[in-house]
Image (cartoon, rainbow, N blue to C red):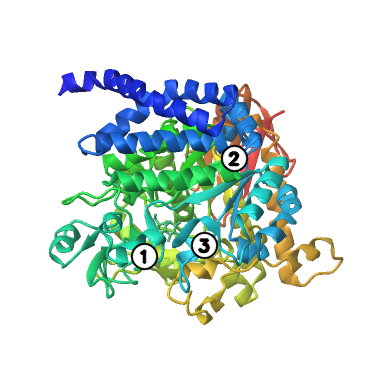
Amino acid sequence: MSNSHLQIPFEAELTLKRLQPRLDQLWVETGADPDCISEFQQRLQEYWLRLFAHLFELYGTRYDFFFHLEQILLAAARSWVERPEDLKKSDQHRIYQDDWFRSEQMVGGALYVDLFSENLGKLRETISYFKDLGLSYLHLMPLFAVRPGDNDGGYAISNYRSVDPRLGTIDDLKLLASDLREAGISLVLDFVFNHTSDDHFWAQKAQAGEREYQQFYYIFPDRTVPNQYERTLREIFPTVRRGNFTWHDGMQQWVWTTFNSYQWDLNYSNPAVFRAMMEEMLFLANTGVDILRLDAVAFIWKQMGTSCENLPQAHTVIRAYNAIARIAAPGMLFKSEAIVHPDDVVRYIDTKECQISYNPTLMALLWESLATREVKLLTQSLSHRQILPPGTIWTNYLRCHDDIGWTFDDEDASAVGINGFDHRQFLNHFYTGQFPGSFARGVPFQHNPETGDMRISGTLASLAGLEQAIDEGDEELKELAIRRIILLHGIILSIGGIPLFYLGEEWGMLNDYDFVKDPAKAGDTRWIHRPKMRWDYLNELEASSVPEEGSIRKRIFTSVQRLIALRKKYDSIAGLAMELIPLRNPHVLGFLRTHSGGRLMVLGNFTEHPQSVSGNILRTAGLGRFFQDQITGREYQTSEDIELEPYQVVWLVRV
Ligand code: GLC
Ligand code: GLC
């Protein structure tokens, strides 16, 4: 065992020697210039061992391993030759400035092209909006060709190389990418590699009975094997269909479908699948993607008798893709979408795997703190989960296009006297507005009657109490809701990581109950928080008189915009270094950010009552006697205790 392990570097080198003539032939065929060749060969030297080792681990026992390896190498080389010059230039920059994405200047937004601006052409005209807001990162939700009818918000892709014709063309996408680059905004696109749509070319071939393509998926003649798998699987979309398999009438067979029944899971134990998806990845890279969002990473490897989530081979697949990206598109980074247990989330985060990750635990626990008015679970979790390996970063978000799941760790909960199961029930009651006194107006997503499991849909503002306050016409409640919204932003903009907005939320948009009128959306409550962008709101910014709701929107927008601008002034916000301040007030979150000499102290009151915080503790943590809140400009001295208003957030800097 240890012996064979030692031989990998030797085998890798020998294999590359054997493959080199094929590569040389490709250089001749493509007429690649010497610089292009030498850059590639240099990076190949650097990353080949890693790539070889991962692929050998996954596919080394296959008789056709060498064939696939050769094809993978050639595809990577071809893609590098075809990579546009401006992208190669930005690759160079990023190789030397490999910390660019961990900067305080990074602020992200995400949007659906059709809902935000109709199409890619019109989206290009709104780049000034992104700049005004202060964005430097833009995630366009999946915009590729999709199946007719329901398509899971674009996540059921029928062709990775063409844009949904309603949104534009690949050329429009490239044009947008280059305009964004010029504006200093990184483009983020999805790599939906766990599954394809049931009308993707591969799935169609499978349906036509071609065995080569049936092996791209998990297809079974009867329930025997599916039933064996089912024993240890979770259900992700239990209201779509029970279990994880879908009967296909045409083939008269069962297909593995973790998500919707029309999303067919790909079989990564087949190297042909790895290679086919790799080619799609490199195609995307060359359209100008800066950050690739790896969708549903937890599910990509299956093994009988396991949960088929977060398996070691899932990591190996991603690491192999990472090595290929380093070689053929070295400026492009990976972001993982792992909305799973926090211990599993971090396992995807590594410079050799995904450099960036969603921070679902922080997201969930910020909402948890609002509901309980206590920060003990949040601080318990932050105390050992916020720091990541060097060279990586979180994206911190409050809402995204998906639901909220309570993915905190039960041991973190029990350490602070909370029963995880009961607490999730409470949070579901609270955020669906059923708990007495709740301010939230969320709705259930994927309620599983068997396990009692449920997730929550709803917009930021509706979950934070604004919808209820407006309905009740209650001024005080409106004020509290607005303050909750600003508090949450004050935290994610300063805590370390790239803050990420689901665009539209910056206006405090409310739930859109009209989604039920569209039959393709009615079955999925996540559409309640994906309304169309309302460009008329922008006029309210300048108008001398606006309706009352308009002035609320204006206040939320300008507050968020100001906080973003403020964030960019403090290099102490870059990176992840963060220390919790032991405030001894259960309702106030306090942390210190330090980076290259700068210090920023952040305090957030999670209740509707004033809270006081010991001046002496702040003096010791902040190393000073006089501080100024950068948000209000107010000065504080630590000879006295500091009073925070209801839901107030302060960013304190020593004066
Ligand atoms: C990801 C997406 C989600 C989608 C699922 C299946 O989790 O964020 O919207 O439903 O993958 O593709
Ligand atoms: C589950 C999955 C996540 C997906 C979500 C969609 O939480 O883990 O990948 O985004 O479901 O609801």
Q: Is residue 436 above or below residue 214?
A: below
User: Which circle marks residue 494 in the picture?
Assistant: 2
Q: Amino acid at mark 1?
A: Gln
**First reached walking from the N terminus: tag 3 or tag 2:** 3
Q: Locate the C terminus by quadrant.
A: top right
Q: Residue 624 appears at what percent x and percent y?
A: 64, 25
Q: Image check: 246 left or right of 294?
A: left
Q: Which residue is mark 3?
A: 145
- Viewer-proximal residue among 355 and 42: 42
Residue 443, horizontal then vertical, whole percent:
45, 71
- Give the Cα separation between the discs numbered 1 and 3: 15 Å
Q: Is residue 435 visible?
A: no
Sooner in the amino-acid sequence: mark 1 or mark 2:
1
- Is 152 or 56 nearer to us in this picture? 56
Q: Label 2, secondary structure: give it.
A: loop
Relative image position of residue 496 (x, y in whole percent): 54, 37
